[in-house]
Amino acid sequence: MIVVMKPDADAEQVERVCEVVREMGLRDHVIVGTDLTVVAVIGDDRKKDKGKLEQIDGVDRVVPILAPYKMAAREGRPSTTVVRISEQCIIGGRDVPVIAGPCSVEGEQQIIEVAQMIRDAGGHALRGGAFKPRTNPYAFQGHGEDGLKMLAAARAVTGLAIITEVLTPTDVELVTEYADCLQIGARNSQNYRLLEACGQQPRPVLLKRGLAMTIEELLQAAEYVLSAGNPNVILCERGVRTFEDHTRNTLSLSAVPEVHQKSHLPIIIDPSHGTGHARLVDDMSRAALACGADGLILEVHQDPVHAMTDGGQSITPTALATMLPVLRRIARAVGREIPTPAGIPA
Ligand code: PEP
Ligand code: MN
């Protein structure tokens, strides 16, 4: 259950709630939102005494949460959680940032060049895999730590924050040294030890939906990160596997409004993995913004034909620049804004 504090409740009253929760043999977790502070009460339901908590000064109401994810649940959290990856890339508020970059970091010159093109096209952050989860063990596995260094070099040149995947709990510390946001990929989104390790480090986490994962399972995966101590989780719908084979995956856009109803966590859309075809990325990006997505993550490569991985679903920086004006109009129509970086025509 969660204890929703009154808007004018002070820190002492919040602390009193936490003390009483601990006296009950339960764990407390304070979440300070933009409008309200809530205290999540975690532990054995039989020990939870709603009446006692309602008596404490500063408490507005106590809401039982039936969902198996307590900290990710929407109840008592009217506004979506805002996750700040960088000044230009803030996800969950009015802004709808566009994260773009190649599937893999291929070399220093390649990543710096594409990062500059993405910045000039109007992108807000750079994605790129240094550790790649490949189906085939003989396929390119990424440049590892060297790839992280190349990403850091691209950030130094462009100022774009970097988002990159971490594959194992033992790599978390290393990736955290370089990345501004850690991506947990679709194949790893139910790797519970990895989720916990990402919950114990300070960077925001981009959690992708697994290939065969229900929304309820996705929110429970997010709960692992949240309950390990990291409140900055961004969810990502990147398509699920179905019988359909005209696309690589089936991009389940209804996940966006569904997640918004069930959880306060922001959710972004990856139409590149979601479709597998560069020709479908623009239209699905439009649809994603129309249904309320909090951001986009797109595979963008300066030379998709020669990309080492996922070239078929990668758009060019020119295509990105061409897409953005219509995406901006759609965002505005639904009360959002794709920020226009300085020097980019609106
Ligand atoms: C990626 O972002 O390149 C990637 C491997 O994504 P996913 O985990 O969604 O397949
Ligand atoms: Mn990819």
Image (cartoon, rainbow, N blue to C red):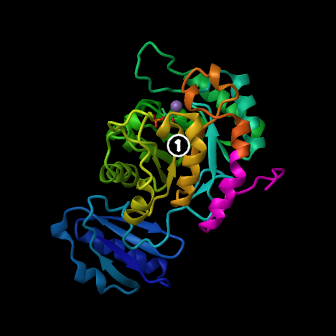
The stretch in magenta equals 323-346
Q: Residue at x 72, y 53 (%)?
A: 325
User: Quick one: 80 or 55, which is closer to the camera?
Assistant: 80
- Please state if 123 lies on the left or on the right of 43 as rendered: right
User: Quick one: 240 or 280, which is closer to the camera?
Assistant: 280
Residue 338 among magenta residues: yes
Q: Quadrant of residue 257?
A: bottom left
Q: Amino acid at mark 1?
A: Pro
Image quadrant for the C terminus? bottom right
Residue at the right extreme?
343
User: Quick one: 86 or 325, which is closer to the camera?
Assistant: 325
Vertical order, 218 against 247 (above or below): below
Q: Residue at x 47, y 15 (%)?
A: 139
Q: Residue at x 50, y 63 (%)?
A: 81
Vertical order, 288 against 47 (above or below): above
Vertical order, 157 against 48 (above or below): above
For label 1, the residue is: 271
- Residue 209: percent from left, percent from top: 40, 44
- Please state if 221 lies on the left or on the right of 91 as rendered: left
- Residue 131: percent from left, percent from top: 51, 27
